[in-house]
Image (tube, rainbow, N blue to C red):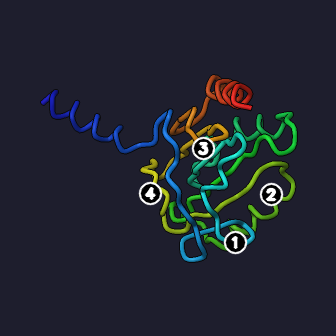
Amino acid sequence: MKIIILFLSSMFFCYALSVGEILSDVVLDKANGGTSQGNIWHSSSLKGKVHTLLYVDPDKRDDCKLLLDALKKLKHKKGDYTTVVIVNLAATWMPNIILESKLKSKEKELKNMEYIFDKKKYLIEKWQLEDDMSNVFVLDKQGRVIYVKNGKLIAHDVIEILNKINEAK
């Protein structure tokens, strides 16, 4: 029985994104999501600068609150760092139009933060992400994952993420 559990858990970790991997190229278009402005979003845009990438279930948004508050205060040179929040619209009971409108207005007040919408859990499948929770990644300038955390973030996680961002810049 222990061998079966070990085998199944190792299979699970083989499919999830891990440190050292480069994200596979994906496109969120009008059918499955896109930018808050209604444009097509390409994951290739995650190269060239350091990114914090959050894939978030709107019902679990408080899981990342400490991090988002810290990122708002982050001092950086323009063009060397961005936060990308991908909202899993299919994971919530809230109507998409309300969420999209709310986030568009929030995006205007937040510097260096971009909202992307995944309407059909497309990235859950393509990147093997955890569904119905927060998935947080820090990517270096080549798009390589240098930090991964799923679930609720605590203060220690936020400090580690900020350190990873500073090291990668």
* Residue 39 circle label: 1
Q: Secondary structure at mark 3?
A: loop
Nearer the observer: mark 2 or 4; the answer is: 4
Q: Residue furthest bottom?
A: 31
* Closer to us: 35 or 102: 35
Q: Measuring from the top left, give residue 166's x and y in whole percent.
A: 74, 27
Q: Which residue is the site of mark 2?
A: 106
Nearer the observer: mark 2 or 3; the answer is: 3
Q: Measuring from the top left, give residue 48's x and y in whole percent.
A: 70, 45
The amino acid type found where label 4 is placed reads Lys
- Are circles 1 and 2 on residues that touch, CB within 8 Å? no
Residue at 68%, 43% in the rendered image: 51
Nearer the observer: mark 1 or 3; the answer is: 3
Circle 4 packing at 10 Å, graded few (<14), some (14-19), many (20+), is few
Cα–Cα span, label 1 and label 4:
20 Å
Cα–Cα span, label 1 and label 3:
21 Å
Q: Which residue is the site of mark 4?
A: 126
The answer to whether 91 appears left or right of 102 in the picture is: left
Q: Earlier in the sequence, mark 2 or mark 3?
A: 2
* Residue 143 circle label: 3
* Closer to us: 133 or 11: 11
The amino acid type found where label 3 is placed reads Gly
